């Protein structure tokens, strides 16, 4: 019987998440055969950045395959996926609605043995259908499709919010004004909690799930760098920055009203979901990484490296 690490893997996308997964898989003691699906333009672009990217992949022994999950038909994706044992979804934030559904249908049609969908986020089962973030409803549907079949094994890795995004000014939780003063905003309440995981640690977890020696993992897997309240987040920012921060509470009612006035704003949809507090936080002690003894970056560690 071939080693699990001899099975060919197709990674969809090479953005921030895809790069972290690539790094972890190629650094594994027994790296699997890896192919990355990239837009045709990325494979032909003469730009120095794209040329260097292709050279780096070649040095790693990673193959490339031209394709675009956003524009390809389901049949076209099915043809691309055939022959791969595992498909890992690492793209979707800016894809058109229906893309994740199209991908999972193509995965099943192609007879892929194992699928890790682009669900590196919140607990969609707890949130359910009908949330303010319509993308989440599609993700619930993807899970229903996977649970409704028995041939393809699947692993959903629930990571919470990407840790860096907690500090993204556009998200609005940790911001710095023109006067240099920092503000920390609580979504829903100061006692509300949010689970976060650093992207590089997500890559490490994917590699452990795909290449680990403890048997194949299946179903929903929870991971976490830290689960933190907004009150403690403010305290961490104050400690690392060495200064008091302003505190603002953004209530659910306020955020819902802001979304009502601008219903197509994706960030406002996210804020409402996190403020409502359902499916966005879980205890670290129940996570895959805790059981495996994997050291993960926490909020303070990220802030010490990045907070200016």
Image (spheres, rainbow, N blue to C red):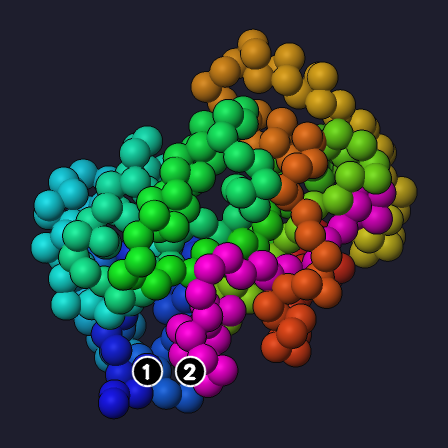
Q: Look at 84% across and 48% down and name the residue there.
A: 232
Structural crowding at the residue carrying mark 2, measured as other residues with C-alpha within 10 Å and reported as few (<14), some (14–19) or many (≥20): some
Which residue is more in the foreground, 141 or 228? Answer: 141
Q: Write the residue at 44% across / 39% down.
A: 140
Nearer to us in this view, 121 or 130:
130
Secondary structure, mark 1, is helix
Locate residue 79, reporting x and y percent.
10, 55
Q: Are marks 2 and 1 in contact (CB under 8 Å)?
A: yes
In the rendered image, which residue does mark 1 sit on?
Answer: 5
Q: Residue 53 lies in what quarter of the image?
A: bottom left
| Disc nearest the viewer among 2 and 1 | 1
Q: Which corner quadrant holds the N terminus?
A: bottom left
Q: Is residue 299 left or right of residue 91?
A: right
- Judging by the rendered image, the residue that carries numbered circle 2 is 28
Find the magenta span and give its range: 205-234
Is residue 236 visible in the rendered image? The answer is: yes
Q: Residue 289: x percent and y percent?
A: 61, 70
């Amino acid at each position: 019987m071939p080693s699990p690490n001899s099975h060919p893997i197709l990674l969809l996308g090479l953005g921030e998440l895809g790069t972290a997964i690539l790094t972890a898989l190629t650094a594994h003691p027994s790296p699997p055969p890896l192919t990355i699906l990239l837009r045709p333009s990325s494979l032909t672009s003469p730009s120095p950045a794209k040329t260097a990217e292709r050279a780096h992949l070649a040095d790693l022994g990673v193959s490339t395959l031209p394709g675009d999950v956003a524009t390809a038909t389901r049949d076209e994706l099915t043809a691309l996926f055939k022959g791969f044992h595992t498909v890992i979804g690492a793209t979707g934030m800016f894809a058109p609605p229906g893309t994740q559904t199209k991908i999972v249908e193509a995965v099943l049609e192609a007879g892929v043995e194992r699928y890790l969908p682009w669900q590196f986020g919140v607990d969609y089962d707890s949130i359910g259908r009908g949330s303010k973030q319509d993308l989440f409803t599609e993700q619930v549907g993807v899970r229903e499709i996977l649970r409704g079949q028995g041939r393809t094994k699947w692993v959903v890795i629930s990571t919470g919010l990407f840790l860096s995004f907690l500090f993204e000014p556009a998200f609005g939780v940790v911001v710095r004004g023109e006067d240099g003063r920092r503000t920390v905003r609580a979504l829903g309440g100061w006692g509300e909690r949010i689970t976060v995981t650093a992207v590089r640690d997500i890559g490490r977890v994917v590699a452990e799930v795909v290449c680990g020696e403890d048997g194949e993992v299946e179903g929903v897997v929870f991971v976490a760098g830290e689960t933190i309240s907004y009150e403690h987040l403010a305290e961490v920012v104050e400690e690392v920055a060495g200064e008091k921060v302003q505190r603002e509470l953004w209530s659910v009612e306020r955020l819902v009203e802001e979304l009502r006035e601008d219903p197509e704003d994706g960030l406002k949809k996210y804020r409402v979901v996190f403020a409502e507090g359902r499916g966005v936080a879980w205890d670290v002690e129940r996570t895959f990484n805790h059981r495996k003894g994997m050291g993960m970056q926490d909020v303070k560690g990220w802030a010490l490296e990045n907070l200016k």
